[in-house]
Image (cartoon, grey):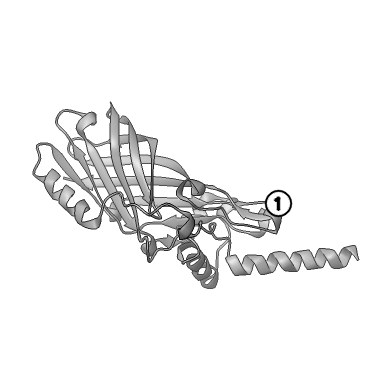
Amino acid sequence: MKLIRGLLLIATLIAAVSLVSCTVSPITPVSERAEPTQLISAQDFATHHAKLSKAQGTLFNLEPKMSSVRIYVFRAGQAAKVGHNHVLSAPEFKGYFFLAPTGAAASSFDLEFRLDQLEIDNPDHRSPLGNAFASKLSPEAIASTREHMLGEDNLQAIRFPFVRIRSVQTVGEAPKFAAKIAVELHGQTREIWVPLSVTGLPESLNVEGSLVLRQTDFGAKPYSVLGGLLAVEDEVIVEFKLSGSR
């Protein structure tokens, strides 16, 4: 009997993994959340960029081909080894950094990318990370992960396609800054402080930093089945290396 129960449990785990493909957690239904708000519309983003381009100071346009934005999602639960960690990247984005002549306090930056343009589990992004990301996922598993992460039961990329980040306050001096940023995800906005390393100024721009986002802070409930036996961590890591030109 113990052997039968063990086999049934294993079969249940395999079925769960195939259905969810280690996805991020489902979000709270729209009816249970506050009305979605936007940090900055696409039109406002362009208008603000045009305004800064005429202001006194130096405006750097961020260049996706010279930059990287990576998002790390982690498996959890007692059966975590059955699942996979995931690496997401944003090969396309818009962004700029405005360096004010009076210093960091008057400087600002904006970044936006689309959820439906995210690349999921590129083998070249996974392999350098070691054993925790060593597995190579099949196209079918990647497609399933995309569907669950960005579909109507989760991040709803059709309704909320953009992730937007805007600086609210900046302190420090090159090369080290602390920035208070507003992050818009899934129609909700949260503010956090992040450290930044900025080099190359004033001729060029290179920015490196990272932050931790908690899914529950944006109305999401981390995925969990079988009483938490297989789950996804609430926290995800976002790392970025951004380069820009004047």
Q: Which image quarter is the C terminus in? A: top left
Identify the element where label 1 is drawn: loop
In the rendered image, residue 118, in percent from the top left (x then y), is placed at: 39, 61
**175 to the left or right of 155:** left
Q: Quick one: quadrant of the N terminus?
A: bottom right
Q: Residue furthest toward the bottom?
A: 140
Q: How many numbered marks are there?
A: 1
In the displayed orientation, state which residue is furthest to the front.
31
Q: Amino acid at mark 1?
A: Gln
Please identify the quarter of the rendering in which residue 225 is found. bottom right
Q: As rendered, which of 66 and 164 lies closer to the eye? A: 164
Tell me: residue 14, above or below residue 230: below
On the image, the x and y values in percent for residue 151 come to 46, 66
Instruction: Single out the residue that lies furthest toward the right.
Output: 1
Q: Residue at 28% across / 32% down in the picture?
A: 170
Picture quarter containing residue 23?
bottom right
The residue depicted at 37 percent of the width and 57 percent of the height is 90
Residue assigned mark 1: 78
Above or below, 183 relative to 8: above
In depth, the one of 209 and 155 nearer the eye is 155
Q: Position of residue 230 (x, y in %)?
A: 66, 56
Q: Residue at x 34, y 35 (%)?
A: 180
Judge the density around disc 1: few (<14), some (14-19), many (≥20) Cα neighbours within 10 Å: few
Residue 135, given in percent of the width and then of the height, sits at 58, 60
